[in-house]
Image (cartoon, rainbow, N blue to C red):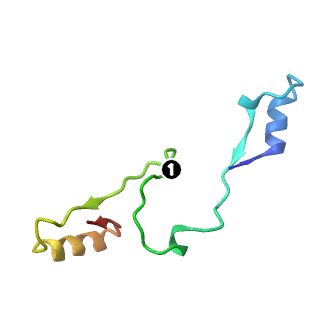
Amino acid sequence: MKVNIEQSYEKMKIDNKFDKRKLVFDEVSPSVHLDDLPPTAIYKGNEEKPMVAFSINVAWGDEYLPDMLKTLKKHDISVTFF
């Protein structure tokens, strides 16, 4: 996140004083994205974004995996198997 100085100033100039509650933030893209990193489990996500993580335990056997993989691929869903 980066402070938008112009918009923050416009919100605060009426009171003529700094008020951190009136700061305006712009989202800035990270320099490194998940696609740039090797595959690994994600343990914590951004609490501000509505996302979910799937972990699939395959200790019970692999007879259902081909159908599961087909369905996951069809819907472009990434999961972690353990």
Residue 41, image quadrant: bottom left
Q: Position of residue 15 (x, y in %)?
A: 85, 22
Label 1: how many residues lie within 10 Å, few (<14), some (14-19) or many (20+)?
Answer: few
What residue is rendered at 21% in x and 62% in y?
Answer: 57
Q: Which residue is found at the position 17% from the left and 73% from the top?
A: 65
Q: Is residue 14 left or right of residue 50?
A: right
On screen, residue 44 versus residue 12, left or right, reads left
State the residue lying farthest toward the top.
15
List x then y, in percent, for residue 32: 61, 68
Question: Compared with residue 73, is residue 19 higher up or lower down, i.e. above or below?
Answer: above
| Total number of numbered discs in the rendering | 1
> What residue occupies the far right of the structure in this picture?
16
Q: Is residue 63 above or below residue 19?
A: below
- Residue sitting at x 70%, y 44%: 25
Say if 18 sits above or below 29 in the image: above
Identity of the residue drawn at 64% across and 62% down? 30
**Element under disc 1:** loop
Say which amino acid is labelled 1: Asn
Snapshot quadrant of residue 18: top right
Tell me the quadrant of the picture where the C terminus can be found: bottom left
Q: Tell me: 7 left or right of 27.
A: right
Image coordinates for residue 23, horizontal then vertical, percent: 74, 36
Position of residue 34 measured from the top left corner of the image (x, y, whole percent): 51, 68
Kindly identify which residue carries mark 1.
Answer: 46
